[in-house]
Image (cartoon, helix red, strand yellow):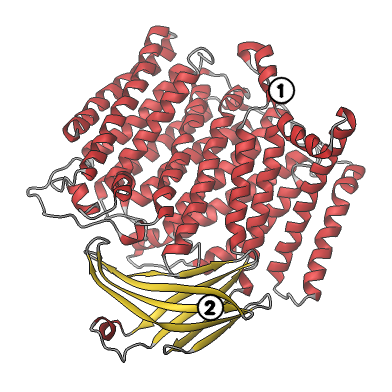
């Protein structure tokens, strides 16, 4: 199977290049036979990518250590689950996995448009095959072939990085990759629109679900990565502004801007150039995120060994995409003029434009902070450290502005907001937001930024609740339905609008969790067995932690452990026993550094986080009974669980928004192949 897999890669490259040429030639000459051949090439590349991926998985499952990739990312005692995830655990396999997902989405896009939107499909197929050709070139010619063999066969492999042997890390990279690759389809349709001159909102309507799908996966991928960092890295946090964390955030920011700005083009025929720029930029950032992780040019817990050849190939491809995109936009600039202009500062168009500008400001700030160390080292030879303080200081006011606009944008009127519209929609929410800040101030909260965040969160939530309440009440009155039934039918009738509101609820919950950070408590104490340390919660609870003792585990071959030291801690909360928790230091075989496993107890309003911070491991592992003293770091972190709850709400809202409503399906059927116009497809939100 492994030989067949490598052969599939070599066959896929000429097939992809041939189909790419046929696609663009078919669009230029308006020849259906060439277009059909290009589309069949898309299917063929997907089939060959599946064969190649199965070949890599087969080498992992059968412990084929003569292959460089398997020898460096697997071992005989590695669990089968992690052997399968070896496909995306390292640089070589993850690039093949990128190709697999890309070719899969390309095949779905071609198949779903086999009888419609035919004027776009030659260029769509050509663009998609151009990108698959790039990844095939990288795999075959950039010294990252997953089927490369060693000159000898080791008895065992090096094993998988212990930090990657975690459930969240096995689903975090694939979810992000799904988001990256799904956005290739909107990009391909945007290129097709630029090439064939059909620059109305049609290409946006066609790709709206693909954009939502990409945003859905990017959002969940980021949340999964935060959960992994919180559980596995053992430092008590969930986001460190790591360069590769930042790289995953960048396309999410621009995709969010794109999702909002396309509403203006659909409803008002505006921001056509802006939307073209955003779709090109977002696609470039998905490639940039992959490049940053896979080139290893920036040090990160996520990155792999530096490989300059792959870096040059990625930089050349991104530069080519940028130049071609600019040329096409400039060529079509006369046909990308807006049909209307912004009539008032107080309008939904204006709010969405400000929203986009702020999102792009955040994108630039994160990108600059991420690349500055690399730029400085390249120009001056000196490294500059850009850490969390910079990103927090710059992005905190940006985040607050976005939170405010999240409430303003959906309910302010199109074109020009009247005084009546402003009072009706914002008097109650502003009052609730101010009352929330005042109540927290009276309760003893003094952190200014946190108070503002809580107030804005209350402002936005009030707007969303009022919108749901008004819509449910109106439907119940008109249709004669009960409140719960009317609520469900309200969402089902316009899933895009109400799903978007639910997404906003999830984001507000996450922002609220972030705002609790100033009240995190940390306690450090060295204990002997039987001694107790006390941790006070800012919410008034008292935790008593009794250190029970240590246990050791030496040379556990089944779990690939060189050694393991486990501390047992009994915990009481306000006198009520919570049970016994463990926190560990581990050294895996063939690992370069030890790892920390933490004890976590989650409650609705806070988390208790227990870390084995320090111990005399040398004496402990030698069996010295007197070396039982250890140092614990105990953290009490309010509202951390709300991050994961907000992620679930965001996921639910995204799924609702992506699911087609019955009314829209009927409308689409009645309007025929041309589909709905943007104005018909998008609710006004009033």
Q: Residue at x 76, y 62 (%)?
A: 455
* Residue 423 % position (x, y): 90, 48
Considering only vertical position in the picture, is 537 above or below 589?
Answer: below
Q: Nearer the viewer, residue 231 or 192?
A: 231
Seen in the image, is 92 located left or right of residue 680? left
- Furthest residue to the bottom? 626
* Residue 29 % position (x, y): 42, 9
Considering only vertical position in the picture, is 363 above or below 518?
Answer: above
- Furthest residue to the left? 152
Quarter-wise, where is residue 684 in the image? top right
Per the image, the residue denoted by label 1 is 663
Q: Mark 1 against mark 2, which lies toward the viewer?
A: 2
* Residue 59 % position (x, y): 21, 41
Considering only vertical position in the picture, is 357 above or below 163?
Answer: above
Q: Residue at x 68, y 44 (%)?
A: 502
Q: Earlier in the sequence, mark 1 or mark 2?
A: 2
Alpha carbon separation for disc pair 1 and 2: 55 Å
Q: Secondary structure at mark 2?
A: strand
Per the image, the residue denoted by label 2 is 571
* Residue 445 % position (x, y): 73, 74
Task: Give the tally of numbered discs.
Answer: 2
Q: Is residue 461 visible?
A: yes
Quarter-wise, where is residue 663 in the image? top right
Q: Is residue 371 visible?
A: no
Q: Residue at x 47, y 73 (%)?
A: 581
Specify few, some or many for label 2: CA neighbours under 10 Å numbering under 14, 14-19, or 20 or more. many
Seen in the image, is 81 located left or right of residue 70? right
Q: Quadrant of the C terminus?
A: top right
Q: Nearer the viewer, residue 316 or 562?
A: 562
Q: Quadrant of the N terminus?
A: top left
Q: Secondary structure at mark 1?
A: helix
Q: Do residues under tags 1 and 2 come within 8 Å of each other at their CB atoms?
A: no
């Amino acid at each position: 199977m492994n030989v067949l897999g490598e052969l599939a890669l070599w066959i896929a490259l000429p097939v992809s290049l041939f189909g790419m040429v046929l696609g663009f030639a078919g669009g230029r000459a308006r020849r259906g036979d060439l277009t059909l051949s290009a589309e069949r090439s898309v299917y063929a590349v997907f089939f060959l990518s599946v064969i190649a991926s199965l070949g890599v998985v087969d080498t992992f499952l059968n412990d084929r250590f003569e292959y460089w990739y398997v020898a460096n990312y697997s071992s005989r005692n590695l669990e089968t689950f992690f052997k399968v995830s070896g496909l995306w655990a390292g640089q070589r396999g993850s690039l093949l996995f990128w190709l697999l997902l890309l070719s899969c989405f390309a095949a779905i896009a071609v198949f779903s448009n086999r009888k419609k939107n035919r004027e776009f499909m030659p260029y769509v197929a050509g663009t998609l095959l151009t990108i698959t050709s790039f990844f095939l070139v990288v795999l075959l010619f950039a010294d990252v072939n997953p089927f490369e063999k060693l000159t000898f066969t080791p008895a065992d492999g090096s094993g998988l990085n212990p930090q990657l042997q975690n459930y969240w890390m096995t689903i975090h990279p694939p979810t992000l990759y799904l988001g990256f690759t799904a956005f290739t389809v909107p990009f391909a349709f945007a290129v097709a629109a630029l090439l064939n001159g059909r620059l109305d909102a049609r290409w946006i309507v066609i790709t709206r679900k693909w954009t939502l799908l990409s945003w859905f996966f990017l959002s969940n991928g980021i949340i999964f990565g935060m959960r992994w960092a919180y559980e596995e890295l053992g430092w008590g946090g969930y986001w460190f502004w790591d360069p590769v964390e930042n790289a995953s955030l960048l396309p999410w920011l621009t995709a969010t801007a794109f999702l909002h700005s396309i509403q203006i083009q659909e409803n008002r025929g505006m921001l056509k150039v802006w939307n073209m720029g955003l779709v090109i930029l977002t696609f470039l950032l998905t490639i940039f995120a992959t490049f940053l992780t896979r080139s290893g040019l920036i040090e990160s817990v996520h990155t792999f060994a530096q490989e300059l050849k792959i870096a040059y190939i990625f930089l050349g491809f991104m530069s080519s995409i940028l130049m071609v995109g600019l040329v096409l936009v400039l060529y079509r600039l006369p046909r990308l003029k807006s049909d209307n202009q912004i009539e008032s500062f107080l309008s939904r168009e204006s709010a969405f434009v400000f929203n986009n500008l702020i999102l792009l400001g955040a994108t630039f700030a994160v990108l600059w902070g991420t690349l500055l160390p690399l730029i400085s080292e390249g120009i001056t030879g000196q490294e500059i450290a850009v850490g969390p303080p910079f990103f927090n200081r710059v992005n905190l006011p940006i985040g607050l502005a976005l939170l405010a606009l999240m409430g303003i944008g959906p309910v302010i009127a199109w074109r020009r907001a009247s005084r009546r519209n402003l009072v009706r929609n914002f008097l109650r929410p502003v009052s609730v937001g101010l009352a929330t800040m005042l109540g927290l101030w009276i309760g003893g909260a003094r952190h200014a930024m946190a108070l503002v965040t809580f107030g804005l969160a209350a402002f936005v939530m009030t707007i969303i609740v009022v919108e749901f309440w008004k819509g449910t009440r109106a439907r119940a009155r008109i249709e004669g339905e009960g409140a719960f039934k009317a609520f469900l039918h309200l969402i089902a009738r316009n899933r895009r609008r109400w799903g978007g509101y639910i997404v906003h609820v999830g984001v507000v919950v996450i922002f609220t969790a972030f705002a609790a950070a100033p009240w995190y408590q940390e306690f450090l104490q060295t204990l002997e067995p039987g001694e107790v340390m006390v941790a006070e919660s800012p919410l008034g609870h008292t935790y008593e932690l009794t250190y029970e003792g240590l246990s050791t585990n030496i040379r556990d071959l089944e779990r690939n452990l060189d050694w393991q030291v486990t501390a047992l801690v009994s915990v009481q909360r306000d006198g009520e026993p919570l049970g016994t928790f463990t926190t560990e230091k581990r050294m895996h075989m063939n690992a370069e550094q030890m790892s920390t496993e933490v004890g976590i107890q989650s409650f609705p309003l806070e988390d208790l986080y227990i870390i084995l911070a320090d111990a005399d491991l040398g004496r402990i592992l030698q069996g010295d009974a007197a070396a039982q003293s250890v140092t614990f770091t105990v953290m009490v972190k309010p509202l951390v669980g709300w991050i994961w709850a907000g992620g679930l709400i965001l996921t639910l809202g995204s799924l609702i928004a992506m699911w087609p409503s019955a009314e829209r399906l009927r409308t689409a059927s009645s309007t025929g192949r041309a589909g709905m116009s943007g104005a018909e497809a998008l609710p006004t939100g009033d």
